[in-house]
Image: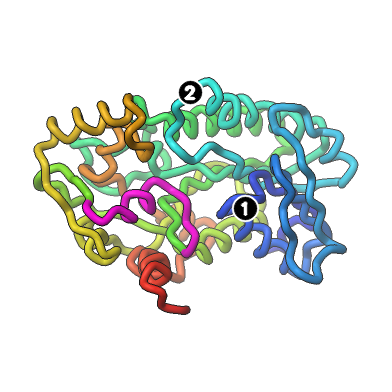
Amino acid sequence: MADPPARIAITGSAGFLGEATLECLTRLPSTEVVAAIDLKPTQGLPGETRRFISAVRDLREPIDDLLADLHIDAVVHLAFVMRPPRNESRAREVNVDATARLLQSCVAGGVKQFIYLSSTTVYGAHPTYERPYFEYEPVNPVRGFSYSEHKVEAENLVLRTMDENLDFAACVLRGCVVMAPGADNFIADSLGMRFLPAPIGANPEMQFLHIDDYTSAVETALGRHARGIYNIAGSGTIRWREMVKAAGGTVVPAPAPLLGALTGLTWQLGLQHRSPACGLNFIRYPWLASTEKIEKEMKWKPRYSSREALESWTSERRGVSG
């Protein structure tokens, strides 16, 4: 595998995944510059100020000047509204429209490589699930779950830009939920509840990705100038009810129609902010993804299992170091 590009920009650099990506790429011997792009200033690693630049920019505006001035070789695009939005148009501006503008800036600014972090939720969580999803299969996001729907739209923009610019290597990494201390996602929110309502009988298998495996996948994709779509996930699975127990919670079974109605009502009234009713699909049905393609083509394998990734998060909650 070749060295990753020397001059890299990270969008959404002040977020949970952005900070981990920044630390990983800044420490690589091949790195000359890491530009951290976010709406707020990003803190660099101690002693690495020479190779680090914090750029406060709004991706809804062109940044080709910044990319060209810094001679950026590659962009890792992480900026995304993670929480289920109440303002759909605002979320679309950030998740989809800003991605389109960023891709235009990359082409205009001479960027040759682009990594986009998508999600295995684009496959959807449906009762028709039979086996882990492969990258060649059609996406089928849960209707109304904006996070996944926007990921699909952004993926299409990324792949279209690559098709239209032959010297532009774009890679979509479809990751399952990353669990680590400080994780900020809808599963971590749910597991943070002491009593967790769930549809009667629901106990799907779940996949998780350790933060170190996430950063190693990004590093590998950059080093191989990867093109196309790749699933990334920890090895093995863990059942939903076992996860809740490990997190110190208790499952409260409820009929699916009643739970859906209550979740939808409390969402509409603003009494809860975790998810609209359609989000219940992700704790009712499996949505596992195969990592066979990336393991075969890029020789990437997770070091940690899904269970170990979850334990890295639950250990922090229990106050256990390491």
Residue 167 shows up from this direction:
yes
Percent x, y of residue 70 = 87, 46
> Is 109 situated above or below 12?
above
Q: The disc labelled 1 sits on which kind of residue?
A: Gly
Q: Earlier in the sequence, mark 2 or mark 1?
A: 1
Residue annotated with mark 2 = 88
Q: Is residue 305 visible?
A: no
State which region is magenta. 181-195
Q: Decide: few, some or many residues near mark 1? Use Cα within 10 Å; few <14, some 14-19, many ≥20.
A: many
Residue 259 higher or lower than 286, as above or below: above
Element carrying mark 1: helix
Picture residue at 52% right of the left edge, 56% below the top: 297
Magenta span has 248?
A: no
Q: Residue furthest bottom?
A: 321
Q: Quadrant of the N terminus?
A: bottom right
Residue 166 shown left or right of residue 65 in the figure: left
Q: How much space separates mark 2 and mark 1, taking CA atoms?
A: 23 Å
Query: Where 65 sits versus 134, above or below?
Result: above
Q: Secondary structure at mark 2?
A: helix
Image quarter of residue 62: top right
Q: Which residue is mark 1?
A: 18
Q: Amino acid at mark 2?
A: Glu
* Residue 259, quarter of the rendered image: top left
Q: Give coordinates of residue 85: x percent, y percent.
A: 46, 30
185 within the magenta span: yes
Residue 10 in the image, given as x and y percentages of width and height: 69, 48
Judging depth in this view, the residue of 43 and 110 nearest the camera is 43
Residue at image point 45% right, 56% down: 178
